[in-house]
Structure formats: C-alpha cells, structure tokens
Image (tube, coloured by chain):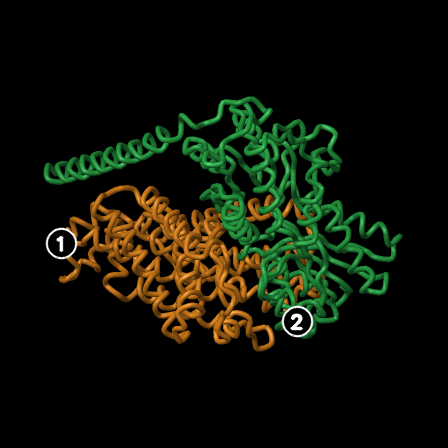
Chain colours: A orange, B green
Amino acid sequence: MNRVLRTQWAPLLAATIIAGVVLSFSTKQFGSSFNVYTILQTASVYAVIGLSQMMVLAVADMSLAVGGIASLVTIATGNLYQVQHWPIGAAIAGSLALGLVCGLLNGVIIAMTKLSGFIVTLATGTAFTGIAYGITSSIPYSNIASVLTTLGQGRAAFFSYLVLPAIAMTLAVGAGFRWLPIGRSLLAVGGNRDAAVLSGLSQKRAIVTAHAVSGLLAAIAAVLYIGVLQSATPATGSDWLIISFAVPIIGGTALVGGEAPASGCFVAAIVLSAINDALIVLNVNTEAVQMAEGLLIFAAVIAGKLGQNVRTGTRRSRRPSTGPGRLGQIAQDSATPGLGMP
Amino acid sequence: MQERVKRQTRWTTTALVLGASLSVAALCVGTAASASTSAKAPTRARTHAKVPKSKIKIALIPGGPNVYFAPWAAAAKAESKALGVTVSYVVPPTPTFDPSVEISTVDSLVAKGYNAFAIFPDGEASIIPLYTRLKARGIPVIDLAGCTSDPTPALLCFATNVEASAKYETQVLTKAMGGKGKIAFLTGLLTDANTALREAGVTQGVAASHGKVKLVQVVSNIDSPSAAPPAVESLLASKGSQLTGMLSTDYYPSVAAASVLAKNAQFRHILFIGQDNDPTVMKALEKGYIYGTMWQNSYGQGVVAAQWLYKMLANGCSVKSNAPFTKVGKTSHFINSGYFFVGKKDAAKYAKGMENIPATTKQVLGETSKFLACP
C-alpha cells in the first residue's frame, strides 16, 4: 500500500477517483455502466499505445513510428484476412510479427548508425504509413473477423473485454522490467548509459530490444483498435503521437530514461480516457476540448512532479547515507553474464 | 574512444555518400523529366491557347490519402481512356492534409509537364500562392471537392454544397422524428473550412423546425479512427436516453456511430443519419440499425474536372465570367456536384458501388456551354 502511495501517479489517480465520484453524483450518466465501459475500452487501447512508447523512453530514446507501425499492421491484418483469406489467428500472428520486425528495424538502424531515434523513427514511421496508404489506396478493409469485433466492442456490464489484454500487457511489461535481466538492463542503459556500459551491459542490445518490443506493442494496440472501429483503415495511428507520449509521461516514465512504471501507464490511460469522456458528458464547448485536454495534461504532470519532489524530500530526510543510487544499483544488478559486451 | 570516433566518422561518411548519391540520382531523374517536358511546359496566358492532345497532362490532386477521394482514381483512369490524354490521380503524401506537401507535389508535377490541375485545397487561403504561380504560367486550375476563398485564381469550384447538404440531412432527420425531438451533431476537424459550413447547415435545418427540434450537443474534431469511437460512445452514454436523432457529416463519426448502434440495441431508438458509404455504415443501414446516409458525387467530381480541363486545353475554352455560379461560404464561383439521401430501401442498391451520382454529372456536363466559352 505504501508503495502505491509513493508512486508518481498516486495523486493523479486519487484526484481522478474523487472527480469521478463527484461527477457521478452531479451527472448520473457519468457513472452509468455504459459510460464506465466506454472509459475502460478507450483506456485499454491508450494503455497499450503508451506502453509501446514507454519501452523506448526507458532507454532514453523515443519513437515517432508508433503510429506508422500501427497503420501498417492494421492494413496487414485486414489484407491477410480479407484478401489473402488467412485464418484470423494466422493473420493476427503475421501482423504482430510484422510489428516486431518494424520495431527491430528501427532498433537496428539506431544502434548501428548511432543516429538519433527521433530522426530514424520519423523517417521509418512516415515510410510505414506511406506503404499502408499505398497498399490500400486509402480504402479501408471492412470485413473484420467477429473475434476482433467481440474483443473490441464486447462487454460484461461495465467491463470491456479489452481490459484483459491491456492488463496482460501491463503486467508482462512490468514483470519484464522488474524480473528479467534484459528488462533491468534497459532501465540501466536508459538511466545512465556510461555507467551501464562500464558495468558490462550492451547499449546496442538494449536499444534494439526496446524498439522491437515497442513495435510489437504498437502492433497489439493496432489489432485491438481494428475491433473497436470494425474497420482496418490506414488512418489508424495518425493521431497516436500525443497519446503515446502523454500516457507514459503522466504515468511517471522519465523522459531521460531509467524509470518505466508500466502500472503508471495503465492509470494514466484511464485518467486521459476519463478526461475525454467527461468533457463530452459535460458538453464542454467543443472548441475548448483540445485546450482543456492540454491544460489538464499539464496540470497532471505538474501534480505528479510536485508529488515526486515531496517524496524525494521525504526519502532524503529518512536516508541520509549515500550509496550507489537506484540507477547504479540497477546497473550492478543487471550486469549478469550473457548480456553482451559494451 | 578513438575506435568509436572512427566508427562514427565511417557511418557519417557512408550516410553522406549515400545521401549525395541518392540526391544526384534524383536530380538526374528530375532533370531528365524536366528536360523532356520543359520545352512543352506552357507559358500561355489565361486565354488557354489550344494544346496538342499529345501534350495534355491533367492531374487530379486530393488533399491527402483519404477514402473519400478514392473514386477520383477510377474517374481519372476512365477519362484518360475516353479522352485519349494523360489524366492522373496523384495523392500528396500527407495524411494531415498539410498544404506545404500539397504545394510541393503540384510543383513536381508541373516540372513533369502537367498543364492542368483540379485540386482539393489543403487550406482555403494557404494554397492560393500556388494557384497564382500556376495562373502566371497559363496553367488552368480548378477547386475540386473544396473551395479556396475569394479572391482566388481558381477558375471555379466544383464540390458538394456541404452547407445545403447538412441542412437537407437535418430536415430529413426532422421529418423522420415526426418533426420534433432532441438531436446531436457529429462532425469533423475544426481546421476544415467545411466544418463551419456544415454546422451552419445543421443550425439552419434545426431553425426550420421553429423550436420543435433542439440541437443538444455538437461533437466536433472527431473525424479520425481514434477519436470517433470514444466520442460517440461518450455522447450516447450521457445523452443516449434523451436523444431522438443524431447526424454526422463526416466519415469516421459515421462509421463509429453505425458500429456502436449495431452492437448496442439500447440506443436504437435514436434515428441516425451518417455520411458516405463505408461498408459498416451500409451494413447497419441494410439491417435497419441506422436511418440513412448522405451520398456524394466523388466519381462525378473527377469526371467533370477532367472533361472541362481537357476542353480548356484541347479546345481553348475559357470559363465564362457570367456563368451561373452559386455563392457558397467564401466563394462566389461555386457549382454543386450533388448529394442525396440513401435510406434503408435503397441500401442494397448502393451498398457495393462507389459514391457516384450519374444524373447530376450528366446534368452538369450538359450545361457545359453555360460555364465554358469555347472558340
């Protein structure tokens, strides 16, 4: 419990729950079963999109190709199922593999050339989107397998089925960072590249792994979204950029790397989804919606930062002794044989 | 450390050499294209002196990759065959409809010898400098599916009258609701000039009910696959029980609403009219989950644009200053490309085809002499 309260997203979650309760009393529709389902459905996709970006932020890099990969994977799924007549399971597997390969390609290019991830993913993301539009001539695939629409739009009362894969991804990513050596090495490399390299960790391997997993997660988000829209359109991912950064940053992921709380992503996704929903439920002037979203995101980040400062101050006052610090400790813990040479 | 510096230098050198090689190759190809066509590039004034058939190259330029423009590709292909000249459908690579990308796309085509353009303007004013340059080179340009603001060098604007269409859509919905009730309106990007016109059309349609129909909520800026589904669901969650009708003037909100209504029977008391012919919309219409959809004449836009631009170049026709244009929004040189309502009884008939209104296309082409003066 104490650990949850110490997280950056705890104040945000508390504020959202309080606001949600107040809204539920003032506007009874906000707490309705269908509205909660709507919030959870959107949040589930946001969470996976956020996890995709968080993977690369963890190694102090960034990916502008999350939307481009999603666009290409969406088209691949639609094409394999509708045109090539693959079974839906095989079509999804093939599309996820494509997402993994796209991410892998980003990682390899960045690791080999040492070019900025910003530049490389800007280029590849645009190329992926271009390929998707080229294949389809902008016309969506509309013959969507029922398993995807059931997943995307199915619910049991307020519980969206999409929550299940989103939680599974959140747990998998969280567990990977916490318990797998490669996960810990990603955080170590992201936190302090020089220290990590001196500890025997491979920077290249970390970057390639982060981008590959990011590609896979973007692909999963894309497949989930096909079910939500009941259409496989190349426009998927076109407006994912802001969400992909907002979710992990609000959730406590450090832009400088080294901190990647997967659970924070899930909470931030719920917060963002609830904000979007509340603005429509409250009939906020549509021209003001974007401005309100921006201000709320800014307020959320400031609140998180203030909370972090307070917690850091508390920790310092409790632990005056100096030591290797969290990042140094991660680097030491992660420097296990078999992780590759610097 | 030295090794790292060497490696970086090696990569930088390789990248520079590769980049330089590609640039040189592109330049060679571009130069070859310009060389073969620069002599043919027109330098005439706006009077459109006759151009030999073999030198006519017409381009239909959408705002970016979007399903709405897809019938233009078919129209370009058909008209190219029918007229015996080059008619190309060239999509600027900008999903966000960035005017700068559209401008560079057109500039590239001019360099390749294209000498007539029908363009969906990405920005009602920002594209005008491009038009001015085209006009200075004697290249005819018309607005297609969207209009630039007056004063504009565009010879005319052939597009759906979105304001009238939205008003008509609202009136059809009002009638279906028995003349009274509460409605919500789903629409597109705030940056799209058409959004304001559509909203004005809906407002006029509501006003025509003399207070019996109330527009309780407008949800705009949701014409994207990510924004539309949650917005529609949130709207239905909050207002679903009190709404009698709902209408959309844009593609993705229509798809999202059709999809949500298909899955959630508790909202089917709401009469919904969507826009365009996505299969999700048409399936929902066939099954009676939605009330109807508004049909546009995308294919006809491509046909008329290609034929009139051809006449300007091949026959030396020019646009009449006293042509019977309509004033719509910020343009006074507008011609309506047509729209109509498709209900359940016609759903099967229109489910498979592309958006096309042959009767309107035929009518406009039949009135060519009212708009073009040919020697």
Q: Residues within 10 Å of mark 1 (few under 14, many from 20)?
A: some
- Looking at the picture, tell me which residue is in the foreground, B362 or B2: B362
- Most distant residue in the left direction: B3
- Which amino acid does the dot numbered 1 rest on? Met
Circle 2 SS class: helix
- Looking at the picture, tell me which residue is in the foreground, B80 or B118: B80
Give coordinates of residue B33: x percent, y percent.
35, 33
Would you say residue B122 is visible in this rendering?
Answer: no
**Residue at mark 2:** B286
Circle 1 SS class: loop
Callout 1: chain: A
Q: Residues within 10 Å of mark 2 (few under 14, many from 20)?
A: some
Instruction: Give how far apart the Cα atoms at labels 1 and 2 are.
Output: 63 Å
Callout 2: chain: B
Residue at position x 54%, y 62% in the image: A42
**Residue at mark 1:** A341
- Which amino acid does the dot numbered 2 rest on? Glu
